[in-house]
Image (cartoon, helix red, strand yellow):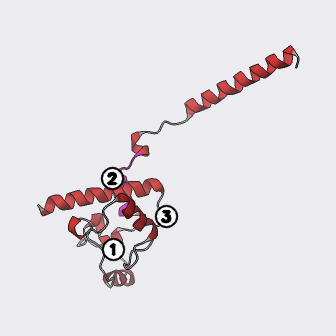
Amino acid sequence: MSRLSYVGLVMLGVVLFDGALVQADRQPAKTPATAQSDAERGRAVFNGKGVCYYCHGVDGNKDQQPQLAADTAALIAQLNPPPTDLRNRTALRLTTDKARAKVIREGHPGTGMFPDTTMTSQELRDTLAYLALLRSEGSAKRK
């Protein structure tokens, strides 16, 4: 290889490497809010896209049911067993977020809980954070 070709190849490598560094600097840094879970975002998923509130009540309050079409409300009222009170720790059978995430993703056999495959992984983490908040709020009210 001629000396000129070798110098050209080295220069090309330097330019490409420098360009990659500039591009890396342009990538947005992950903030703790995007890398971790957020209960307030989880609340929005629970009471919105996740439709959890249809059965578990607005903000997890079983006595605060949303306005639903009559046929939907009738089907939910017939669920046996009835939807779990998410604010009552003693009524909850799932003890880990891994188990809760699996039930949200895959449904809960023997109950009316159907799978939710529309949540992103971040939305699922946020929803789990919100469920933890509901459990702690519910426990505080029962003391």
Within-10-Å neighbours for mark 3: few <14, some 14–19, many 20+: few
Magenta residues: mostly which secondary structure? helix
Residue toward you, 15 or 45: 15
**Rendered location of residue 35, percent (x, y):** 43, 44
Sooner in the amino-acid sequence: mark 1 or mark 3 = 1
**Residue 88 in sight here:** no
Report the Cα–Cα distance between label 2 and label 3.
18 Å
Marks 2 and 3, the one that precedes in the sequence? 2
Q: Is residue 27 above or below residue 88?
A: above
Which of 68/15 is in front?
Answer: 15
Instruction: Say whether residue 11 is left or right of residue 101.
Output: right
Q: Using the image, tell me which numbered label, if any, was put on residue 105.
A: none
Q: How many marks?
A: 3
Which image quarter holds the C terminus? bottom left
User: Residue beneath label 3, please?
Assistant: 118
Q: Residue at x 28, y 63 (%)?
A: 59
Which residue is identified by label 1?
55
Q: Is residue 45 magenta?
A: yes
Where is mark 2, residue-wise? Answer: 39
CA–CA distance in space, label 1 to label 2: 19 Å
Residue 31 drawn at (x, y percent)? 43, 39
Q: Amino acid at mark 2?
A: Ala
The answer to which image quadrant residue 142 occupies is bottom left
State the SS at label 2: helix
Neighbour tally class for label 2: few under 14, some 14-19, many 20 plus, Cα within 10 Å: many
Whichever of labels 1 and 2 marks the residue nearer the N terminus, that label is: 2
Q: Amino acid at mark 1?
A: Cys
Which kind of residue does numbered mark 3 sit on?
Thr
Residue 85 image position (x, y, % from top left): 25, 70
Q: Quadrant of residue 23?
A: top right
Q: Which residues are magenta?
A: 36-46
